[in-house]
């Protein structure tokens, strides 16, 4: 008996020890009173990889590091035109349509800029009152140094594409002596090998700088695992206070900051909560303040939650589509021959498929008012380029059947259409773990069966699925795209199938290539509008894929958060200006 | 016995190496690419290649294997691909304390609950209580863990806000004193440990009941009763001790679980434990981390079996090693 109880005692004590140990493994205790009122809690799906602008690849990383580092310019999304606007302290790219530049641009490091007459160089004049958090001034040399890091193949920055127009890039190696000049501490010049639009020049020369004086010592082989990544020296409205891997990232307002000012909310905590249902529950109890990508089906539940929650939509940036292989992949892989795919090779068949899919009822069943039927891959949010005249095909199975029969696809003995002995039967692949796509794929299967097409569904693990797509191994699939704010679709539709890595369908239309190239040569993006209009007409006619719907992402906020301005750029666009109202219910 | 243990340990070395070699080739032959994250529009096609070069994936698989073998023999399992190139054992060391805490609490609760339920239903065989416990145990045993966890959250965190929804600590817990910090931590562990142990205890209870029933029918139990010992002593001292023999195998078998983590619970309750490390490594094709995890779990399974065998010999004099 005695031995047993003492054993139990030891077990309990050792357990307590383990609990203590686990508790103490977090570093840096902070002193301070009640946390709830002064801490904004943001739920995230996963941890940031690097809080370093040169190598931080994920959206989460960017959300965090953009609060730690300053930027050369500030950008805003102009909702009336759908164009990005850039602002320096004393200059704005486009004056029309925006608000007062002064306040928003206060964090910019550039006072102003000047694009050369020949559009081959851009000169920035920097402010002289900007300092890294250790007091060292921020100069043009920091920018040049960091751009060399961005270009370094050993570091392998995912942002190398931003340097593609600098002198030397056309020959494979950037000639930094000529490409970036720093005549003095406050003058920064970028030189390009060809004339480029001002919009693009601004977009590509505003990568975030790192402090040269601390990073200079780090050899490029050690760049990715340098301890400086855990303890970043920046100059933004916030500083990193604590980072417990896979648990939370805590930022504290940076009291000395003048770029533009210390963050309004004293502490911002990014908490990692991998499960959606749990993120939702925490938003309901008030344990977290912000949860991104709330599903429309959960809005009702949130309306009755204990914590007051509001839902805010952002622009249309993501769409789902059904991809049809336009060419016969087997022949292409065998010897590079391009011949039409036996099922989906014909434009008319693809149009028939689009007509047969009831996209509106997918939306009604899942996204509701937070989705829009898509016509092409140009988002309605990019108003300057969007073609209103291209109206998505409406659901019309009768017309679809007519088109199929016109193409020679007639019902076989089992009701499945056939042509020359080939049945219209295929497998539609999609990636695992996306409820919305699963929902849509079932409706699509149903719709196609009604017009005599046999569609099997197959769900693959994401990594495998995307590899199969890249290697052009699958004939029909459902996937999604998140579009960039610069329209550059050649990667996805270009006729050179080796170069266009994302042209999974094998779609080829020389006019599309031409239009994309023409649009790039325009020095003012608005002048490219006619090309994009035609581009959309052609895609609509050819239906290389069936564009399903644009998704309006919806973010949930506890009502105690005030002052948030979401836009298509980011949910956390002006998070340093948000405030917490103390009167509202606060997480205990 | 000492010789036996040494022999088993020596055999374990080539076994672990065999497992690691197999894993090495299987994950490299599996579809998927560790650099896949960098293949997207807007990222230069050069980047994925540069990343592969950094990871040493551009060499032929066999050369990669030789290089890998060289560094593993020096104790270097490499750096994680997906977790900011931290050394893999750092990644594991960060996840282990959380995992071990949960697992030990769960194991203790598991065995205590399981043994109590098992003994009660064996002693009261075929009574209403036995039926109730058996059906109840089966009910919880068949319930999917993740669903049970979500139900517990809905009931005890949303409808009756008694426990926190998830996380290891409250927001701002860093400023608490050590005692309050620990209480807060325990408070956050109540729901997950309950879910895990109810599920596990049900299984153990079935085991204990079975072996208890067998033991109770033995002659020496009848002898114990015949010599007038009180029922409690008969059950606890004479029957239970013998009935627990098979349970010891279960204990040895639970050792890997202590370190491998409980994936669903970790995801749902947002704990950064080993289960998530393993699964995320697999999804990201993080080869070094997968291998390090395999190494740890492989070693533990072998150790667990060895410990179970040794314990058997210790408690059962009929077994000689």
Image (tube, rainbow, N blue to C red):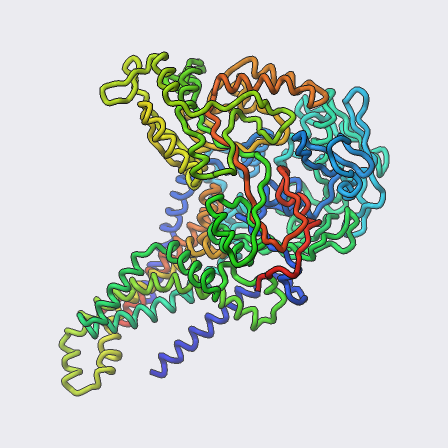
Residue B204: percent from left, percent from top: 29, 65
Image quadrant occupied by the N terminus of chain B: bottom left
Image quadrant occupied by the C terminus of chain B: bottom left
Q: Is residue A361 visible?
A: yes
| Position above or below: A199 against A346 | below
Q: Is residue B46 visible?
A: no
Quarter where residue B174 is shown: bottom right
| Residue closer to the observer: B167 or A140 | B167
Measuring 31% from the left and 66% from the top, which residue is drawn there? B310
Residue A278: percent from left, percent from top: 48, 54
| Position above or below: B121 against A186 | below
How many numbered circles does the render carry?
A: 0
Residue A516: percent from left, percent from top: 61, 19
Left/right placement of residue B14 relative to residue A27 reads left
Name the outermost residue toward the bottom: B228
Measuring 61% from the left and 20% from the top, which residue is drawn there? A532
Left/right placement of residue A36 relative to residue A329 reads right
Residue A581: percent from left, percent from top: 66, 57
| Residue closer to the observer: B20 or B35 | B35
| Residue closer to the observer: B162 or B144 | B162
Quarter where residue A365 is shown: top left
Measuring 48% from the left and 39% from the top, which residue is drawn there? A367
| Residue closer to the observer: A97 or A411 | A97
Measuring 69% from the left and 32% from the top, which residue is drawn there? A84
| Position above or below: A492 against A510 | below
């Amino acid at each position: 008996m005695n031995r047993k109880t003492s054993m139990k005692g030891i077990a309990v004590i050792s357990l307590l020890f383990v609990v203590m140990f686990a508790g103490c493994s977090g570093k840096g205790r902070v002193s301070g009173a009640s946390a709830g009122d002064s801490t904004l809690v943001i739920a995230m799906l996963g941890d940031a990889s690097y809080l370093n602008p040169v190598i931080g690849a994920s959206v989460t990383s960017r959300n965090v590091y953009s609060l730690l580092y300053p930027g050369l310019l500030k950008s805003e999304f102009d909702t009336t035109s759908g164009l990005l606007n850039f602002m320096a302290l004393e200059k704005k790219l486009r004056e029309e349509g925006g608000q007062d530049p002064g306040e928003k641009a206060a964090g910019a490091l550039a006072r102003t800029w000047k694009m050369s007459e020949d559009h081959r160089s851009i000169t920035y004049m920097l402010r002289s009152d900007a300092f890294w958090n250790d007091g060292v001034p921020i100069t043009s040399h920091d920018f040049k140094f960091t751009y060399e890091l961005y270009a370094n193949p050993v570091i392998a920055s995912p942002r190398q594409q931003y340097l593609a127009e600098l002198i030397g890039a056309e020959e494979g190696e950037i000639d930094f002596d000529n490409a970036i000049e720093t005549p003095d501490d406050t003058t920064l010049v970028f030189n390009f090998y060809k004339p480029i639009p001002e919009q693009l020049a601004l977009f590509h020369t505003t990568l975030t700088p790192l402090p040269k004086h601390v990073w200079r010592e780090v050899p490029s082989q050690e760049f990715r695992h340098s301890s400086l990544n855990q303890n970043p020296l920046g100059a933004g409205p916030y500083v990193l206070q604590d980072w417990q891997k896979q648990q939370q990232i805590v930022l504290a307002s940076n009291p000395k900051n003048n770029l533009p000012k210390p963050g309004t909310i004293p502490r911002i905590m990014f908490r990692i909560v991998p499960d959606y249902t749990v993120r939702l529950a925490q938003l309901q109890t008030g344990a977290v303040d912000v949860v991104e990508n709330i599903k429309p089906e959960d809005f009702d539940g949130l309306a009755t939650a204990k914590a007051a929650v509001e839902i805010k939509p952002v622009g249309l940036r993501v769409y789902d589509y059904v991809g049809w292989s336009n060419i016969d992949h087997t022949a292409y892989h065998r010897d590079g021959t391009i011949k039409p795919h036996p099922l989906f090779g014909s434009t008319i068949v693809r149009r028939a498929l689009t007509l047969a899919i009831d996209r509106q009822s997918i939306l009604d069943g899942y996204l509701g008012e937070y989705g829009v039927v898509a016509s092409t891959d140009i988002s309605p949010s990019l108003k300057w380029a969007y073609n209103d005249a291209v109206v998505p095909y409406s659901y019309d199975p009768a017309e679809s059947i007519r088109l199929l029969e016109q193409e020679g696809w007639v019902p076989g003995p089992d009701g499945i259409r056939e042509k020359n002995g080939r049945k219209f039967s295929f497998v539609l692949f999609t990636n695992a773990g996306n409820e919305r796509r699963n929902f849509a794929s079932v409706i699509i299967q149903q719709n196609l069966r009604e017009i005599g097409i046999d569609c099997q569904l197959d769900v693959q693990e994401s990594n495998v699925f995307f590899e199969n797509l890249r290697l052009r191994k699958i004939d029909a699939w459902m996937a999604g795209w998140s579009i960039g704010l610069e329209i550059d679709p050649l990667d996805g539709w270009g006729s050179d199938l080796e170069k266009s890595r994302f042209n999974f369908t094998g779609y080829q239309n020389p006019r599309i290539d031409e239009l994309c190239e023409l649009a790039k040569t325009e020095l003012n993006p608005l002048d490219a509008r006619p090309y994009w209009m035609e581009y959309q007409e052609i895609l609509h006619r050819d239906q290389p894929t069936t564009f399903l719907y644009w998704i309006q992402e919806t973010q949930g906020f506890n009502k105690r958060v005030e002052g948030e301005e979401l836009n298509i750029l980011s949910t956390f666009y002006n998070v340093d200006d948000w405030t917490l109202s103390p009167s509202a219910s606060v997480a205990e | 016995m000492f010789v036996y243990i040494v022999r088993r340990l020596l055999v374990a070395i080539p076994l672990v190496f065999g497992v690691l070699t197999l894993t090495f080739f299987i994950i490299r032959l599996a579809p998927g690419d560790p650099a896949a994250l960098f293949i997207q529009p807007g990222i230069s096609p050069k980047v994925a290649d540069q990343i592969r070069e950094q990871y040493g994936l551009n060499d032929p698989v066999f050369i990669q294997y030789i290089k890998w073998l060289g560094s593993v023999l020096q104790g270097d399992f490499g750096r994680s691909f997906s977790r900011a190139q931290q050394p893999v054992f750092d990644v594991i060391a960060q996840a282990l304390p959380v995992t071990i805490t949960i697992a030990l609490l769960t194991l203790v609760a598991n065995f205590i609950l399981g043994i109590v339920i098992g003994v009660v239903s064996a002693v009261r065989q075929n009574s209403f209580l036995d039926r109730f416990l058996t059906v109840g145990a089966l009910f919880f045993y068949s319930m999917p863990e993740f669903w049970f966890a979500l139900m517990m959250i809905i009931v005890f965190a949303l409808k009756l806000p008694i426990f926190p929804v998830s996380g290891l600590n409250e927001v701002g817990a860093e400023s608490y004193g050590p005692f309050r910090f620990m209480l807060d931590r325990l408070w956050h562990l109540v729901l997950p440990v309950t879910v895990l142990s109810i599920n596990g205890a049900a299984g153990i209870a079935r085991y204990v009941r079975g072996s208890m029933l067998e033991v109770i029918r033995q002659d020496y139990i009848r002898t114990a009763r015949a010599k007038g010992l009180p029922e409690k002593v008969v059950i606890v001292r004479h029957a239970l001790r013998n009935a627990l023999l098979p349970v010891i195998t279960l204990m040895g078998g639970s050792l890997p679980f202590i370190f491998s983590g409980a994936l669903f619970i970790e995801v749902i309750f947002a704990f950064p434990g080993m289960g998530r490390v393993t699964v995320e490594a697999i999804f990201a094709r993080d080869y070094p981390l997968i291998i390090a995890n395999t190494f740890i779990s492989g070693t533990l399974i072998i150790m667990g079996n060895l410990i179970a065998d040794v314990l058997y010999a210790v408690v059962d004099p009929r077994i000689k090693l």
